[in-house]
Image (cartoon, rainbow, N blue to C red):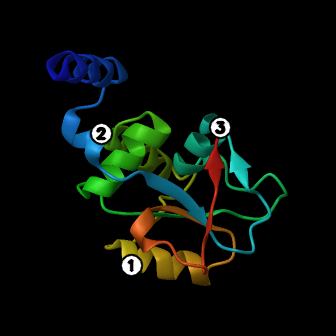
Amino acid sequence: MVRLIRSLLWALLMLAGLSAAEAAEPPVLLVAHPGVDTRQLTRDTTRAIFAMRQRTWPDGQAVRVFVLPNDHPVHARFAKEQLAVYPHQLQLAWDRMVFSGTGQAPNRVTTQVEMRERIASTPGALGYLEREYLDDRVQVITMD
């Protein structure tokens, strides 16, 4: 019976495109400055914001996007799990905008602690954190 359950779980993980190691990782949550009025975003809107194509929140406030380095495991998980893109695809979009002069890349931070501090202190900020890094200085934005 245990083997059957493990086999079914493995099959579900493979169908979802996740390895067992990825499934065991804590979720990466979308977080914003506490002054942001938006509480929920669609995946498409979130993807447009992180691709730097949408520069304002739905209420018109400017979005300040913060990301971890491309090789950071939390950045890779956020891109794949929440945005359904690979980190290199985001980088290509940012490079294209910067080199063409039509936009700018997001603000980079080196750690999740720095991410939390910058989001908490920057009006309109948006980023992502694992649950253990959350505190009352940032708010979680749900994705539908």
Mark 2 or 1, closer to the camera: 2
Q: How far apart are marks 1 and 3 (CA)?
A: 26 Å
Relative image position of residue 73 (x, y in whole percent): 25, 54
Residue matched to label 2:
23
Distance between the Cα atoms at labels 2 and 3? 20 Å
Q: Mark 3 points at which residue?
A: 144
Place residue 15 in its image quadrant: top left
Q: Name which residue lies at 49% across and 82% down.
A: 117
Q: How far apart are marks 2 and 1 (CA)?
A: 23 Å
Viewport quadrant of the N terminus: top left
User: Residue type at mark 2?
Assistant: Ala
The tag earlier along the polypeptide, 1 or 3, is: 1
**Between 89 and 137, the one nearer to me in the picture:** 137
Q: Does dot 1 land on a helix, a strand or a loop?
A: helix
Front-most of 107 and 47? 47
Determine the image quadrant of residue 44: top right
Depth check: give the residue in front, 101 or 90: 90
Residue 45 rendering spot, x and y as whole percentages: 66, 41
Q: Which residue is drawn at 65% across and 72% down?
A: 33
* Category of crowding for the residue at label 3, using alpha-carbon neighbours closer than 10 angstroms: few (below 14), some (14–19), many (at least 20): few
Q: Which mark is residue 113?
A: 1
